Image (cartoon, grey):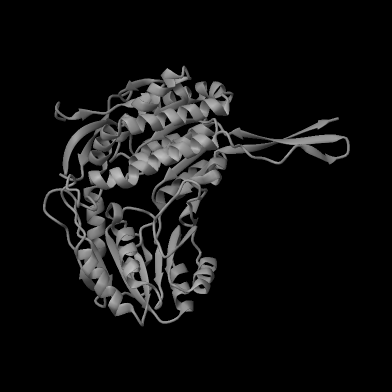
Amino acid sequence: MSAELRRLRNYIDGEFRDAADGRTTEVIDPATGEAYATAPLSGAADVDAAVAAAEGAFPAWRDATPAVRQRLLLKIADQFEARQDELLAVECGDAGKPVEVTRQEELPMMLDQLRFFAGAARMLEGKSAGEYMDGLTSFVRREPVGVCAQVAPWNYPLMMAVWKFAPALAAGNTVVLKPSDTTPASSGFLAEVIGGVLAELDLPKGVFNIVCGDRDTGRLMVEHPVPAMASITGSVRAGMEVAGSAAKDVKRVHLELGGKAPCVVFGDADLAAAVEGIRDGGFFNAGQDCTAATRVMVHESVHDEFVTALAKAAAEVRTGDLSDPDCFYGPLNNADHLAKVSGFIERLPAHAKVEAGGERVGERGYFFAPTVISGLKQDDEIIQNEVFGPVITVQSFSSEGEAVRWSNDVEYALASSVWTTDHGTAMRMSKVLDFGTVWINTHIPLTPEMPHGGFKQSGYGKDLSAYGFDDYTRIKHVMTAL
């Protein structure tokens, strides 16, 4: 490997370290397709060391007051804000994100999420103490679960890391975090910031640890006997493996997996608003989002008009130069993923029609054109399976019942949206759509106060909100004789 490549390292017990056996992997810039760094390919010794550090720090961090936990997260947020140019350079280079879109859309969300969980640290809730049996008083303790093994995905490396470590630390847990093997660079920034704040506040160094590596590294973390909880954002396959491994020692599991969000557009909808919202919700982050607006069902009365308008809007979306302020999304994450997305297009049935895009953009990097496909049937592969790219499919429905059946007729159940000006329609659909989120006349906004998580093969457990915070706590009943 070239000596000019940037050298990334693990962060264990307050120290940056190479993998114990010296193994590394190359990290590829998705905008160029070229290696720009090396990262540790961590093994059992590295996972053992990180878990031991987290386990050693747990008693002191568990006993820290909520005010101390809040102070840690607030200072982390302040550092993110003060060093935002550095954060953006690392994150955009790591994941191939447009600089201005990330500055305007992702950075404010990260800061808000950190500060929300800082507040949540001081808002533990439980039943009031009382005499529920004669002569006995009961009360509830809400406690941290212990060491948390967390695996973050490559689509939002820093933000998804925040979704994991912030509630875990706020609740008094210690953390071993593994970034994706294709986007490990921002974890170095994270370690530097959190490590610096821990030192500033004279808190245990092992509260937060990072181990870089591949799928086997993550498996070692989940199978390790010490962590009390495993949390992963990733594919359905990965979630099934984690759940199976965790079952061996009845480890608590938190899974945020794939999605195939339906967007149901009724004939009375504001079509201009629906086209704009679905375009943005489908192509943001190159469609590499489990909640992306990828599967549109439009009432037959406005189907043709909608398709024409969406295809025109897609053609106006820009990808390419990440420094261009008008660039809306960047490349796909890696060469294998580009091949996967391209494969869906290559295997389209004869009845499908590509209305816009459908091809790779340029020969350098992993860019793919904003794509709209119509004429599809419910059992088509591209309707049933997650593409995770800038591809929006459109189907025509004839009745509300048909729209509901098609919406729910997939294995995923993370997010959905309804587009209508009729309040009754919106309320009926919000009840019958089998998805963890139902947006009405919008698609993709998230706020830290509200839960995010799915059903079926989209996983279980909630991110964000007080519900997400609760997932990182356990409940203990204490009863005493009077």
At a point 36% along the width and 25% down the height, the residue shown is 11
Q: Does residue 337 lie above or below 300 as drawn? A: above
**Nearest the eye: 356 or 212:** 356
At a point 20% along the width and 68% down the height, the residue shown is 356
Q: Is residue 225 left or right of residue 290?
A: right
Q: Position of residue 409 (x, y in %)?
A: 45, 69
Quadrant in which the N terminus is drawn: top left
State the image quarter where residue 143 is shown.
top right
At a point 26% along the width and 43% down the height, the residue shown is 95
Q: Position of residue 103 (x, y in %)?
A: 29, 43
Q: Is residue 470 left or right of residue 76?
A: right
Q: Is residue 85 left or right of residue 269?
A: left
**Nearest the eye: 86 or 209:** 86
**Nearest the eye: 465 or 164:** 465
Q: Farthest residue toward the top?
A: 202
Q: Does residue 13 lie above or below 98 as drawn? A: above
Q: Position of residue 346 (x, y in %)?
A: 21, 66
